């Protein structure tokens, strides 16, 4: 099968498509033929990793996990002998988180992993783009104890995490102020934001307005700076403050919202699998709108 292999740390072209052996399916696993995956800033951080501290985690000389990719959507092609939850032909989507491995034509996953049936109303491309931004936004909004009636500011509302956070915060009944660049103002408003601040024209920290929760979904502001725009008991949280671990409950929660039409993953561009290095180069610029999807033939 074809896989995008990251043989060493470096620029996008260190990611190369190679032919490798098919994974063998264990008794408790399913084999999925991928239809779509994404390239995220997380993939780019691992691939370009320069800092020793990060390499201690990802691998000293080269990435320990050479197939990147944290989320996917596809069709089950084979099930292990003990599998009861899924059957051949099921359309599923999944989140691997830091376990990675989704930048390949096939993947095997444990049936009780972070894996479930794809919402019928979404394409594989859309389903592949639910988990990374969606579960991260959910984790941090819950950490911020999101409540109905709260006034929340979401910085970086046009990214994958930010566009998910806007929709989730509205679902939880908050009043949402979204911060994004000029070219994103209109579509972020359509996502449901009550107010939009264009960060190229206005600094939300100097506006004099106060928020119960500030969620920095791109990790561009700092806590002390954010404090100036918080109410007395307000909280500042950032994607830089901790790790949102993958779990099935959150994926199922998002799936239900998709089915209720309360959540829709945003897709910026798709690239064919053969052009995955170009997708890395695009994502690395830090200006994608929502998600960048990779498609398979
Ligand atoms: N802690 C965790 O467990 C966890 C999990 C997942 C992700 N993350 C992190 O979360 C971050 C966001 O991921 P993502 O995929 O959502 O990022 P992304 O989609 O790549 O973010 C790009 C978006 O951010 C906007 N942006 C850039 N600079 C901005 C600024 N100064 N103010 C406001 N908006 C700005 C860009 O809009 P413009 O083009 O207009 O600038 C663009 O739309 C990444 O750093 C990622 O590593 C953390």
Image: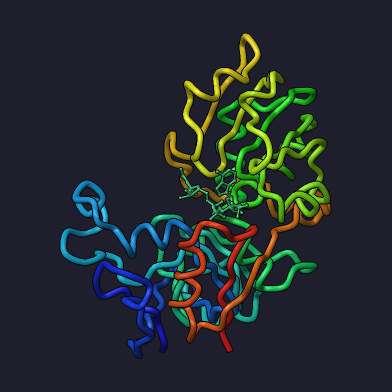
Q: How is the model colour-coded?
A: rainbow
Q: How many labels sit on residues? A: 0
72 up-or-down from 49: above or below:
below
Q: Residue at x 39, y 68 (%)?
A: 68
Q: Quadrant of the C terminus?
A: bottom right
Q: Residue at x 67, y 35 (%)?
A: 202
Where is residue 271? Give x, y as percent: 57, 79
Where is residue 243? Give x, y as percent: 43, 41
Horizontal relation, residue 8 to residue 109: left or right: left
Question: Which residue sits furthest front?
Answer: 201
127 or 215, which is in the foreground? Answer: 215
190 or 67, which is in the foreground? Answer: 190
25 up-or-down from 143: above or below:
below
Q: Quadrant of the N terminus?
A: bottom left
Where is residue 178? Give x, y as percent: 71, 39
Locate residue 13: give its quadrant.
bottom left
Answer yes or no: is residue 257 visible: no
Where is residue 279? Give x, y as percent: 50, 73
Q: Residue at x 64, y 59 (%)?
A: 289
Horizontal relation, residue 251 to residue 26: left or right: right
203 or 186, which is in the foreground? Answer: 203
Answer yes or no: is residue 3 visible: yes
Q: Residue at x 80, y 52 (%)?
A: 186
Locate residue 173: give its quadrant.
top right
Locate residue 88: give its quadrant.
bottom right
Horizontal relation, residue 251 to residue 241: left or right: right
44 up-or-down from 201: above or below:
below
């Amino acid at each position: 099968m074809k896989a995008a292999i990251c043989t060493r740390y470096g620029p996008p072209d260190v990611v190369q498509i190679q032919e490798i052996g098919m994974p063998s399916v264990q008794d408790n696993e399913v084999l999925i033929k991928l239809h779509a995956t994404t390239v995220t800033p997380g993939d780019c951080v691992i691939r370009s990793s320069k800092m020793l501290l990060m390499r201690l985690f990802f691998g000293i000389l080269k990435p320990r996990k050479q197939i990147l990719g944290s989320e996917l959507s596809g069709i089950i092609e084979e099930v292990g002998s003990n599998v009861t939850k899924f059957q051949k032909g099921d359309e599923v989507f999944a989140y691997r988180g830091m376990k990675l491995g989704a930048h390949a034509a096939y993947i095997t996953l444990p049936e009780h992993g972070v894996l479930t049936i794809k919402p019928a109303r979404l394409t594989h491309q859309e389903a592949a783009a639910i988990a990374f931004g969606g579960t991260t936004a959910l984790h941090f909004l819950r950490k911020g104890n999101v409540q109905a009636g709260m006034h929340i500011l979401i910085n970086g509302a046009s990214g994958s995490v930010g566009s998910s956070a806007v929709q989730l915060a509205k679902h939880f009944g908050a009043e949402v102020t979204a911060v994004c660049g000029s070219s994103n103002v209109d579509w972020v408003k359509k996502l449901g934001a009550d107010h939009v601040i264009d960060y190229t024209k206005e600094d939300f920290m100097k506006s004099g307005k106060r928020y119960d929760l500030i969620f920095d979904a791109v990790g561009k502001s700092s806590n002390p700076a954010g404090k100036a725009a918080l109410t007395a008991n307000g909280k500042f949280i950032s994607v830089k403050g901790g790790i949102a671990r993958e779990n099935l409950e959150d994926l199922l929660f998002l799936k239900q919202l998709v089915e209720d039409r309360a959540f829709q993953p945003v897709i910026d561009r798709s690239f064919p699998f053969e052009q995955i290095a170009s997708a890395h180069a695009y994502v690395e610029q830090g200006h994608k709108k929502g998600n960048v999807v990779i498609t398979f033939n």
